[in-house]
Image (spheres, rainbow, N blue to C red):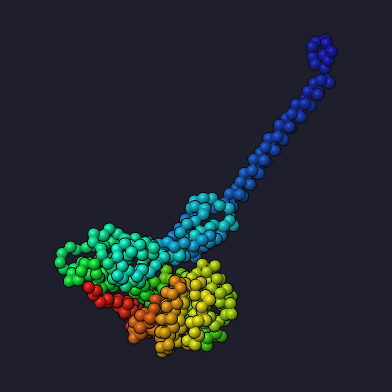
Amino acid sequence: MDGENGEGVPHPSIEKWRERLERVLRVSVLVFVLAAAGFLSAVTTIRIAIRGRIVSMPNLVGQAAPDAQHMLAARGLQLRVADRVYSPLPVNAVVRQSPPAGEEMKISQDAHVVLSLGQQTVKIPALEGQSMRVARIGLLQAGLQLGEVQSWGKIRQVGNALPLTQRWNWALRSDAETIAHAASNGENPVKITQSAVSRYDRIQRVSVPAAVEVAPSILAADFACLGDAIRAVERGGVSLLHVDVMDGHFVPNISIGVPVVASLRKATRLRLDVHLMIENPEQYIEAFASAGADMISVHQEATPHLDRALAMIRENGCKPGAVINPATPVMMLSEVLGKVDHVLVMSVNPGFGGQAFIPEATEKIRELREIRDRHQYNYRIEVDGGIGPENVAAVARAGAQILVAGTSVFHTADPAAAVREMAQLANQALAQKVRKVV
């Protein structure tokens, strides 16, 4: 047979080619195995590298915006504010987040959050002399809900502000002595008392606790033990600290800057009301907002672009406020009153603590309140300078809702007691008595 010798043994040339083919096959298999191993190794390396750039989204709901930003920064993520809504959470707390907690994200991706504007408040509508039907409609239009009522004729009342979601709960006594109506408002219930000697459709007296708060100014505190001073006023029940920032140009004094505000943010959960008494405030708004300010106020006299400055404050997640000096009339703010969260009336010339109150400031406060009521603006009225137990009642009656006090708080033996005293005096001044209607 061709290719074999007579004994059936393969021809030597065929055997040689067979050996060569086997070697080629073995080498090919080896190359394939090595290539496959290299490919798997490369895939594993890539997956590890990609995995190293994947992080888990933390739970931000309920966190203050600066805390949420720090949590994201630690994971290489960035915070983006998508919206702001009214909610029961504190101002600038995270209400919603996207993506949700636990979802995997790539480093440098944006996390979108919705921040709280706090709890919206509305004024109790004027119900004096109204029938039950008209009064009920007035409450509903104001966003208030009426609870179950056994007997309700006409109402006489003096109102302040209640949460938008407030539900009124009425407790009635049917005996011949007193009918008491109580509407729960957290720690400050609205109390309406009706005398049995008058007809049951008339109310004799209404007492509504005012939304007035004292804001201690740390400018008057001892900076050597600032932490102790803050804890002292916290015991007094305050929720707001006033922080005066001075540059030595706009006012003749130099005080604290961004680093101190950042340190305060770490030391307390109180809201920080940062009052910029500086030239060119627009250059520093972002820095103070990032440091932890909750409210930022700029002077009308310090910038020709007040509208822009106020917009920058809101864009940086803080409540914007406008300030006017004693010689500046209220009318200078007419174009921005619908864009601010608070208006600060200086009742001393800014720059130094311990000055005497300028009486003309009271009329400015009254004017701002009348403008707010007339145009249905939402700003709060703040007063700063010479505020103490001797004048808190007058400025509260005029319409001030945030009372900045420095010397009268921190230069006393008991700052907590001083804060409580001034808050009590202000609220007592607003507890109005209405004569009996028959």
Answer left or right for 191 relative to 253. Answer: left
Q: Nearer the viewer, residue 209 or 424?
A: 209
Which residue lies at the image location 67% right of the left edge and 40% below the top edge? 39
Which residue lies at the image location 51% right of the left edge and 54% below the top edge? 98
Residue 422 picture quarter: bottom left
Answer left or right for 318 relative to 229. Answer: right
Q: Nearer the viewer, residue 8 or 337?
A: 337
Looking at the rendered structure, the number of numbered marks drawn on it comes to: 0
Whether residue 370 is visible, yes or no, is yes
Q: Nearer the viewer, residue 355 or 8?
A: 355
50 vs 424: above or below: above
Give the x, y percent position of residue 204. 24, 73
Q: Quadrant of the C terminus?
A: bottom left
Which residue lies at the image location 36% right of the left edge and 68% below the top edge? 125
346 vs 213: above or below: below
Q: Nearer the viewer, residue 114 or 328?
A: 328
Residue 38 picture quarter: top right
Q: Quadrant of the N terminus?
A: top right
Give the x, y percent position of residue 298. 52, 78
Which residue lies at the image location 44% right of the left edge and 79% below the top edge? 368
376 vs 37: above or below: below
Give the x, y percent position of residue 188. 31, 69
Answer left or right for 135 relative to 68. Answer: left
Residue 37 picture quarter: top right
Whether residue 242 is visible, yes or no, is no
Give the x, y percent position of residue 265. 46, 70
